[in-house]
Image (cartoon, grey):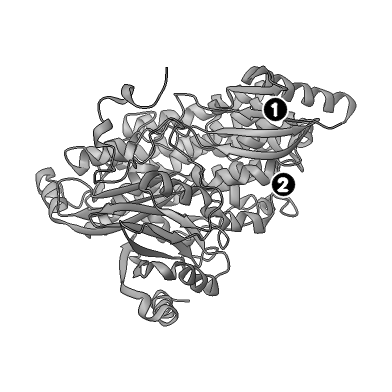
């Protein structure tokens, strides 16, 4: 007789920016159904932001929506407000914004790659990748003064310039990554163990990706060329000629599995290096702010009315902010949508048919916050058995070892 | 299809249901390339037609999210779409806004046309009290299960969360 067990993977960890729990229904080793419980830890950050004294204070709230793609939320918000209040951004600011966005992407993708290695039980690679990531964190600190929460954005431009004397160090960091890139590709994509655990796992078709409105590397790994930087460009991207990265850059064809996710994210690091180089080469001169006097800017925003929509390609996919201004001190309406919000429905088709030991890597493949896999409960006829994150991780590691040893 | 043609196509297909329509043009980068945002206010009964009319331009229009806010007598929902994606610099942002009177807060679901709309529609139910006709899964998404019924966090009227502020410990029936 077959028994279906319920395995909730999750739910909430206070440190999460996106609290998520996945309830998996398991028959034997196989996942037969999935239900996603989207957190019970809604912080209401939009409400807090709308009830600040003025829009600049709200902008500082936006920086704190996310700790990893830290530059993306303020960037989307300023674009929405600039559209609503009709503020034109100086060209130099457009380029500085693009550079910071790419710095953010390099660190986020490397962080994800390390986490993916850890989920597979390959901790040497985790430590190597994160050591590799330190260079870009130092670069972020060198440019903005902060490793995270760069606080570069302001309505109508950026707060800090990147003067030409800082270029050599940025170029040096890019050279460092270019020199190490081949080795990184070798370690991730030519490794037998990683291939055993990721090829053909978590497969999703192109059509499903389109129907579910997926965004970012999750959709590009399925061969959908959605990329806000390419199709609806803002900032410096309007001047650049870039192609969305799809898995066929490395593989013969698009399969749409977890391996393709790794391919897309790694090659996007390379693309980011190119973009930063191009931005430095073509950087225009001029002011970095449309309005330097803060009281004048605040007055302008107070008198503005209208609505604006800002889209930015974050490391995890498109992030959008909607703002409604109504001739008042603060925003009348503010809606934030992070990329994971759109990518979560992908778990269901990806997990169904997978094995328990594959849950961590599939859940991790869309790059959500991983602390959500901290705890799991197995319900067995009224008896509860708690599977911790460590237990799930152990199962995953055991599967890797079994595959290496016996090939099945 | 160019942005002006898209706007004409929408006006043509939806006819009288279009109450207001305008285009926002943003110029970006050194090249001052134009980026288009189309804003259309439509009759709430025509939301499914609006989605279908975008699907004629590109199958599976990309739904970013549905925004919503309380505007006094009405609750306003804004459906943000992107069409012409997978092109080079040709995509257009199309935003449909619908006004729902507070005494009759309901609108047709679009989840059968765009399955990706499920989470965002469920979020509007709990945050604004909007009912989506034809939606099967109406469970809460972000709010906890013990959050009181009939309180909608995004509302600015008596159904809003004002009373709960600063005393969250009194809310719910936790023991």
Query: How far is disc 1 from disc 2 in space, using C-alphas?
Result: 17 Å
Quadrant where the N terminus of chain A lies? top right
- Give the number of callouts: 2
Relative to B136, A402 lies left or right: right
Q: Nearer the viewer, residue A9 or A177?
A: A9
Identified at 70% across, 34% down, the residue is A25
Decide if residue A327 is on the left or right side of residue A43. Answer: left
- The disc, 1 or 2, on the residue closer to the chain's N-terminal end is 1
Task: Name the one closer to the observer, B175 or A188.
Answer: B175
- In the displayed structure, A197 sits above or below A339; it is above
Is A25 drawn above or below residue A294 in the view shown?
Answer: above
Q: Quadrant of residue A147?
A: top left
Report which residue position mark 2 lands on: A203
- In front of the other: A13 or A7: A7
- Helix, strand or loop under label 2: loop
In the rendered image, is residue A87 in sight? Answer: no
Residue closest to the eye, A72 or B112? B112
State whether discs 1 and 2 lie on one chain: yes
Residue A18 locus on image (x, y percent): 47, 34
Left or right: B84 in relation to A81:
right
Which picture quadrant has residue B73?
A: bottom left
Tell me the quadrant of the picture where the C terminus of chain A can be found. top right
Q: Which mark is residue A120?
A: 1
Q: Chain of mark 1?
A: A
Does A407 sit above or below residue B115?
above
Residue A382 visible in rendering: yes
Q: Residue at x 37, y 29 (%)?
A: A141
Q: Mark 2: give few (<14), some (14-19) or many (20+) Cα within 10 Å.
A: many
Residue B67 horizontal/vertical position (percent): 37, 53
Position of residue A380 measured from the top left corner of the image (x, y, whole percent)? 72, 22
- The subunit letter for the residue under badge 2 reads A
Secondary structure at badge 1 equals loop
């Amino acid at each position: 007789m077959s028994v279906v067990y319920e395995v909730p993977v999750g739910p909430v960890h206070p440190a999460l920016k996106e609290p998520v729990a996945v309830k998996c229904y398991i028959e034997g080793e196989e996942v037969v159904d999935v239900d996603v419980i989207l957190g019970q830890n809604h912080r209401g950050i939009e409400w807090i932001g709308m009830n600040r004294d003025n829009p600049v204070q709200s902008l500082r709230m936006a920086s704190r929506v996310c700790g990893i793609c830290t530059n993306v939320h303020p960037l989307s918000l300023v674009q929405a407000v600039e559209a609503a209040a009709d503020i034109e951004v100086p060209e130099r600011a457009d380029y500085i914004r693009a550079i910071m966005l790419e710095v953010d992407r390099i660190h986020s993708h490397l962080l994800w790659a390390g986490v993916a290695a850890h989920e597979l039980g390959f901790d040497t690679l985790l430590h190597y990748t994160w050591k590799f990531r330190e260079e870009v964190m130092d670069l972020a600190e060198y440019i903005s003064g902060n490793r995270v929460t760069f606080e570069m954005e302001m309505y109508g431009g950026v707060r800090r310039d990147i003067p030409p004397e800082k270029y050599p160090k940025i170029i040096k960091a890019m050279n460092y990554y270019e020199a190490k890139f081949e080795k990184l590709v070798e370690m991730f994509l030519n490794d037998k163990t990683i291939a055993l655990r990721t090829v053909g796992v978590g497969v999703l078709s192109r059509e499903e990706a389109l129907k579910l409105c997926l965004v970012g590397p999750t959709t590009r790994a399925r061969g959908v060329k959605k990329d806000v930087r390419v199709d609806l460009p803002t900032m410096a991207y309007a001047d650049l000629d870039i192609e969305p990265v799809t898995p066929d850059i490395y593989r013969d064809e698009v399969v749409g599995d977890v391996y393709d996710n790794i391919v897309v994210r790694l090659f996007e690091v390379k693309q980011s290096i190119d973009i930063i180089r191009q931005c430095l080469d073509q950087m225009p001169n001029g002011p970095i702010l449309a309005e330097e006097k803060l009281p004048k800017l605040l007055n302008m925003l107070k008198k503005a009315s209208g609505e604006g929509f800002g889209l930015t390609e974050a490391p995890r996919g498109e992030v959008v902010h909607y703002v409604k201004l109504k001739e008042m001190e603060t925003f009348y309406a503010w809606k934030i949508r992070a990329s994971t919000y759109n990518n979560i429905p992908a778990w269901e088709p990806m997990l169904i048919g997978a094995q328990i030991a594959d849950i961590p890597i599939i859940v991790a493949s869309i790059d959500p916050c991983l602390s959500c896999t901290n705890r799991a409960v197995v319900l067995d006829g009224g008896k509860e058995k708690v599977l911790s994150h460590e237990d799930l991780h152990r199962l995953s590691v055991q599967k890797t070892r079994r595959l290496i040893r016996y090939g099945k | 299809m160019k942005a002006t043609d898209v706007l004409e196509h929408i006006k043509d297909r939806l006819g009288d249901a279009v109450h207001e329509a305008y285009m926002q043009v943003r110029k970006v980068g050194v090249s001052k390339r134009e980026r288009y945002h189309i804003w259309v206010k439509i009759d709430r009964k025509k939301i499914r037609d609006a989605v279908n009319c975008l699907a004629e331009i590109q199958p599976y229009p990309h739904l970013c999210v549905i925004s919503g806010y309380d505007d006094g007598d009405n609750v306003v929902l804004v459906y943000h779409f992107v069409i012409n994606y997978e092109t080079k610099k040709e995509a257009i942002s199309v935003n449909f806004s619908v006004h729902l009177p507070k005494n009759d807060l309901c609108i047709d679901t679009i989840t059968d046309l765009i399955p990706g709309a499920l989470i965002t529609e469920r979020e509007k139910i709990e945050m604004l009290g909007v009912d989506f006709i034809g939606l099967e899964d109406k469970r809460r998404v972000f709010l906890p299960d013990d959050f009181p019924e009939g309180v909608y966090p995004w509302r600015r009227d008596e159904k809003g969360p004002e009373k709960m502020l600063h005393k969250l410990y009194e809310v719910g029936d936790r023991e």
